[in-house]
Image (cartoon, grey):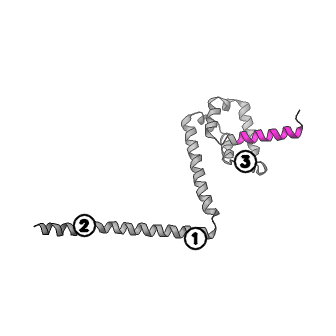
Amino acid sequence: METIDESEKRRFEVECEFVQALANPNYLNFLAQRGYFKEEYFVNYLKYLLYWKEPQYARCLKFPQCLHMLEALQSQQFRDAMAYGPSAKFVEDQVVLQWQFYLRKRHRLCMMPEEEKEEQEDEEEEEEEEEGKEEGEGEEPEAMEVEEATTTSAEQ
């Protein structure tokens, strides 16, 4: 038989796992299609889980976007929309885009000043090379015209 401490720990772990599962739009689609979002007890449970937004609980989450989903699930309109595959796909795409942008921006914010300087210099060198190539491309057709004119006059 579990003690109260073990029972509370188990409940914490289960609720933590469930809240984090809400970060997956496909799981939300699954729940919506099975009718969970229409059940009053389930909607009340989602309201109860809002305590995870408090800092002492939120720090335990690996997927903080689950808190945004939990907040969105408080809306009947969002719960209804998640029953449709295209809506779930759209939300999934937005989550992926946010994640990609966040990682790039985080990388830039976390760079050491020396690394940032080196990256900036590399970018400037690449820009100069591209400008040089663009200028070179514009000159080649003129050179070809001169050669063609010389060849044409020599043939005559």
| Dot label at residue 127 | none
Q: Is residue 134 left or right of residue 31?
A: left
Quadrant of the frame with the C terminus: bottom left
Measure the C-alpha gap from mark 3 to mark 2. 65 Å
- Against 47, residue 137 (above or below) is below
Viewer-side residue, 117 vs 95 = 117
Q: Is residue 15 within the magenta segment? A: yes
Q: Could you tell me which quadrant the N terminus lies in?
A: top right
Dot 3 falls on a residue whose secondary structure is loop
Q: Tell me where the magenta segment starts and ends, as one range.
A: 1-19
> Image quadrant of residue 115?
bottom right
Name the residue rendered at 70%, 48% in the picture.
62
> Mark 2 or mark 1, which has the lower sequence index?
1
Residue 77 visible at all? no
Q: Residue at left 72%, top 47%? A: 61
Q: Which residue is mark 1?
A: 117
What is the number of the mark on residue 61?
Answer: 3
Disc 3 versus disc 1: nearer the observer: 1
Q: Main secondary structure of the magenta part?
A: helix
Is residue 43 inside the magenta stretch?
Answer: no
Q: Nearer the viewer, residue 110 or 72?
A: 110
Task: Identify the residue position indicated by label 2 in the image.
Answer: 144
